[in-house]
Image: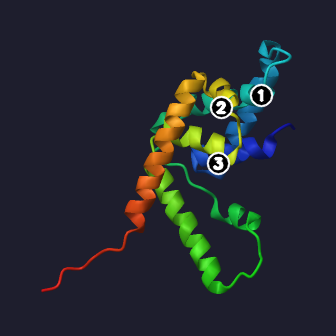
Amino acid sequence: MPLFERLYNFACWLTQDRNEAEDLVQETYAKALKGFSSFQPGTNFRAWIYRILRNAFLNSRTGLKSASVALDVEDNDAAMPAVNETPESILLQRADWQLVQQALEKLPIAHREVLLLCEVEEMSYQEIAAALGVPVGTVMSRLSRARQALRAAVNTMHQPRTTKKS
């Protein structure tokens, strides 16, 4: 099945639940098969199927009510290089992932999804625009704002807490 793993990963981030993500991907493929006549040859299939997934998500019980998107740290650990890893470096990597995950949870869903599609799914601005049904300029604007907000959230959470002396 084309793009299955990528769609499933994106669905996991959106739904925060593996079972619901499986259902969402299954629904996406069912809708894609049913509506395949609406796909125009020569257009971007990946953007088309991501749009179906996104619309299915927005119409689901989770939908826009979703308050956060979680990164699956275990899946990302497997992709990290194992060169010169020490217990300390592993701990720091996991702490960094947790920090990024917490920062992502603070982003509005419109910013989260454009950031994840660009940075994690490596989609072009045009593909993201087609998948989300927005102009390329909106993608660029949301991506810029998402990066700024993510940076600010990480910096805020990363600052050491000071204690008052009595």
Instruction: Judge whether residue 109 can be spotted in this image.
Output: no
**Separation of disc 1 and disc 3 at Cα?**
18 Å
Q: Residues within 10 Å of mark 3 (few under 14, many from 20)?
A: many
Q: Residues within 10 Å of mark 1 (few under 14, many from 20)?
A: few
Q: Looking at the image, which residue is at 58% across and 45% down?
A: 15
**Separation of disc 2 and disc 3 at Cα?**
22 Å
Residue under pointer 3: 12
Q: Looking at the image, which residue is at 69% across and 40% down?
A: 23
Q: Looking at the image, which residue is at 68% across and 85% down?
A: 86
Of pointers 1 and 3, the one earlier in the residue sequence: 3
Q: Residues within 10 Å of mark 2 (few under 14, many from 20)?
A: some
Q: Nearer the viewer, residue 33 or 9?
A: 9
Residue under pointer 1: 30
Q: Nearer the viewer, residue 113 or 16?
A: 113
Give the position of the N terminus as an image quadrant.
top right
**Separation of disc 2 and disc 1 at Cα?**
26 Å
Amino acid bearing label 1: Ala
Residue 50 as seen in the image, left or right of residue 139: right
Of pointers 2 and 3, the one earlier in the residue sequence: 3
Residue under pointer 2: 125
Amino acid bearing label 2: Tyr
Picture coordinates of residue 5 (x, y %)? 78, 46
Residue farthest toward the left in the current orientation of the protein: 166
Judged by depth in the image, the label closer to the viewer, 1 or 3, is: 3
